[in-house]
Amino acid sequence: MLLHKDLGRMDYLAALALQERLVESKQREVSADILLFVEHLHVYTIGRGGKESNVLAPEEVPVIRTSRGGDVTYHGPGQLVVYPIIDLRSKLRKDVHRYVRNLELSAIRTLIDFGLAGSRRPPFTGIWIDDQKIAAIGIAVRRSITFHGLALNVNTDLSYFKRIIPCGLTWANVTSMASELSSEPNFAGVRERFLQNFAEVFGYSDVKEGLFAEDRGWRMEDRDPRSSIIDPRPA
């Protein structure tokens, strides 16, 4: 079973705390896989191996060192962020590379639904339209449970990417669905198409909206303060 939940707009650290709680729960007991959708408030994040020098001029935007793979990226309104909490032991037999390929394929199919031809560009992760990146991927796996995920630029303000070197690639540009279509696609429609494509690619036949956080009886305020800019726990 796949449970999904749209979190709306949420602070990055609050969403990370939620992911970590769900990962811990899935490690303790067998439960449904989860797909979280969220729009973040403005934030720059740096992955485990990322370079702080790739953050050029963040100004008022917070910069957070986090536990995902990859370098620096931007999250903000108009960007569809997807966090799968999946047990690779049951779904993909610990095959992390296949998991990433399927995540990329879910985004590629979603772009096709809106008339856009996205593609992979090995050895780089993410989804590209020519030399412009439209979706970034940075994952983590903790004891076979995935978290972090994918960010698809839908109606994103791309000017924020000019303050960083996205993904540490000096030659790459960034684009969005709105830029490529010359009009703003319906954000909820993009989210719904991604959900359907994700379920098909990963082979889920039972897909339901879930209230998993409330059902487990804990609050967002209960998050571990170490999951932060200073001390991200290793994946």
Image: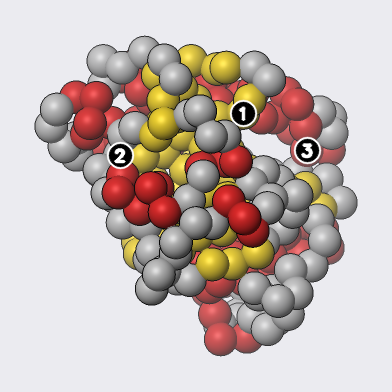
Residue visible at 75% across and 44% down in the picture:
87
Q: Which residue has dot 3 on it? A: 88
Q: Which of 226 and 23 lies nearest the eye of the viewer?
A: 226
Q: Which of 192 and 30 lies nearest the eye of the viewer?
A: 192
Q: Is residue 229 above or below residue 136?
A: below
The local crowd at label 2, few if under 14, some if 14 to 19, many if 20 or more residues have their Cα within 10 Å, is: many
Q: Quadrant of the N terminus?
A: top right
Residue visible at 48% across and 51% down in the picture:
164
Mark 3 vs mark 1: in front: 1
Of helix, strand and loop, which one carries label 1? strand
Which of pointers 3 and 1 lies earlier in the amino acid sequence?
3
Circles 2 and 1, Cβ within 8 Å, touching? The answer is no
Q: Can I make out residue 26 in this image?
A: yes
Mark 2 vs mark 3: in front: 2
CA distance for labels 2 and 1: 18 Å
Of helix, strand and loop, which one carries label 3? helix
List the single residue furthest toward the left: 183
Name the mark on residue 154. 2
Residue visible at 41% across and 25% down in the picture:
132
Q: Position of residue 182 (x, y in %)?
A: 14, 27
Q: Position of residue 171 (x, y in %)?
A: 51, 28
Mark 2 vs mark 1: in front: 1
Please state if 8 lies on the left or on the right of 5 as rendered: left
Which of pointers 2 and 3 lies earlier in the amino acid sequence?
3
Name the mark on residue 125. 1
Please state if 144 lies on the left or on the right of 113 as rendered: right
Q: Position of residue 27 (x, y in %)?
A: 82, 58
Q: Amino acid at mark 3?
A: Leu
